[in-house]
Image (cartoon, rainbow, N blue to C red):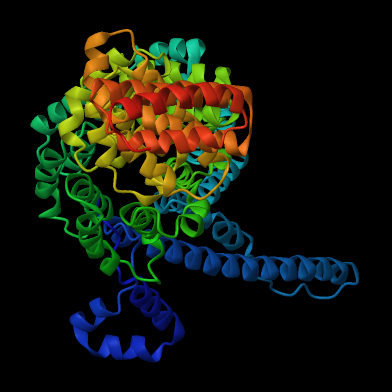
Amino acid sequence: GNRTPPREQRAAMSALYGRQAGGAGAGRGAKGGAAGAKKNEAPKLEDFVSRRDWTGAITLIEFTNKAAGEQAAAAAAAATAAVAAAVAAAQAAEDGTKTPKQPAPAAAAAAAASSGGVNSEWLAYCLSHLGDFEKSAAVYQEMANKDETKPECHTYAACCLFNMGMYDEAEEEAAKNPKADENPLHVRLMMHLAHKKGGTEGEAKLNQYYAKLTDSLEDQLSLAAIHYRRTHYQDAIDVYKRILLENRDYLALNVYVALCYYKLDYNEVSNDVLNSYLQKYPDSAVAINLKASNHFKVSNGEAGEAELKRLTDLITSTDSARSFASNLVKHNMVVFRDGDNALQVLPPLLNIIPEAKLNLVIYFLKNDDIEEAYQLIKDLEPTTTQEYTLKGVALCCYGQKTDSKEHLKKAQTYFQLVGSSPMDCDTIPGRQCMASCFFLLHQFEDVLIYLNSIKNYFTDDDDFHWNYGIAKSCDGDFKGAEEEFLLIQNESYKSDYCYLSWLTRCYIMNGKAYQAWELYLKMDTSSESISLLQQIANDCYKVMSSDSFFYFSRMWQMGSFFFSAKAFDVLEKLDPAPQYWTGKRGACIGVFQMVIAGVETRDRLRDVCSMLSTSTNQQSVASILSVIKKWAKDNSLLM
């Protein structure tokens, strides 16, 4: 089961030291009869272990070992004294004196010295369950080196090294067991090590050890764990459910089933399965944390945080057995609060909670610290959908920032692996990845197929609206793109030049050139404002120069030539380059043409004449103004 350790360790330690302290208490207990004797009975190791009070058990073992050590030291001192007395007696015999009577404590010393063997095994066992794998491995290794009759201790030490992430060292330690082939635990350990190794060699070894598994409970649980690690969550669920049918009292397996459903995004089902366990063990750190995570994914961070407070209340500063639970709370509070205190909380947890690294990468990406995110994840060999996806995003951002086609190609490959995976292809993350893959391939029609299928799940997601808007723009649906861009609420996004540029193009293509011009006027003078001005000048001119008469007739009344002329006029004043004069001249003539056609107001001819009169190319300007003024006079327009 996943029972959490009791919280009365301090009381247990105090009681232990109290009994050690005096005989007066023992005397009073004796006078109190049977009840008094039971009250003062020495604690037993089995009691601590049955309660999963690993700290209490370790304290008792260390105290017992210390007492045994003191006894052994006293016995050894007595033995030394006896030897000295024997030597003295021999010398006395030679002198003809009487040999004194001496004790023979050597056997007692040997017995005292050998009392720590069993305790060492229990100590390593308890340390392992407490999560102190380094100390546990050291104890197991010491036992294996001192006693050749306990080769299985090498395997136990290897399990500890595995839990520390030291996979090469674990494999070396496991190989020291000469009876490894007879040990089922060795087979299970090597199967998990093969999975961690990965690649063709790792897969071959995994299959080799998989073939050696039996129908034993331990082997089947280990198989389910492998399925989980390989993200084959449904296969893991099938194994756990089969075991539960035969062993309904193994309630902790419900937590593993719930975790698999959580990974499959069946969060409500996950919570239903969890409840059967929480009813009996309401203080389970793992179960409470998982339920909080489900609430977070179904609702929001506040819902997850409210559930997590139950776990916070259970954790005390003196309960070392809950140190991992405390780390879970710290980690998930950062997630639920959208990265608050991430830089303070997550770095120390990188080697404790696997998700800490991924969430720190997400934090860096969200805060536009692309370099830090890339450096943190570049050496990660992904094994799960989340890791493949996140590494793909980091590579994509880094490739765009550094203009690296190599990194963008790798990102596209990671996205394709997830999106085409049979397990992920019909999930929301899988379709997002496939859309990202086609995005990088510039196949926007395919991008829209995938984004259209999941848009109802992202009605308030600015990132989704951003990507959806760009994809629609690239596919020619500027009206739909404009709608998506205007749904974005994040002010930092709305002030980004990329956003302004795409929205400007949508306005122009949708016949709202004046709104594009308003976007420019709101900007401070900078290189970006000049770039936007150039875009307005060229896009407005281009849309009015379309070869399609239908498109032309739909757009000409919208003043695009006029705002193109205004943009080119500003650009010419900033830089009298020939191309700006050429563009300005063409746009001004275009406005004149629209006025003659009756789809542009005559008042704009005055603005056109004003813009032309400030140009440095007066020879060309004179002939144009002459034609415009003649037409104005003939049509009774006062210039």
**Residue 285 to residue 378: above or below:** below
Residue at point 56%, 26% (across, down): 580
Please tell me which residue lies in front, 431 or 442: 442
Residue 456 percent coordinates (x, y): 15, 33
Q: Quadrant of the C terminus?
A: top left
Instruction: Find residue 331 and report its image quarter.
Output: bottom left
Between 516 and 326, the one nearer to me in the picture: 516
For image coordinates 26% across by 41% down, the residue present is: 486
User: Closer to the camera, 99 or 631?
Assistant: 631
Q: Can residue 97 be seen at all in this image of the molecule?
A: yes
Residue 223 in sight here: no
Residue in the image at 44% along x and 13% along y: 203
> x, y percentage for residue 380?
52, 30
**Based on the displayed image, in which of its 4 quarters is residue 506 positioned?**
top left
Who is closer to the viewer here, 638 or 149? 638
Instruction: Pick out the residue farthest to the right.
Output: 95
Q: Is residue 546 left or right of residue 137?
A: left
Q: Is residue 464 left or right of residue 100?
A: left
Q: Position of residue 448 (x, y in %)?
A: 25, 19
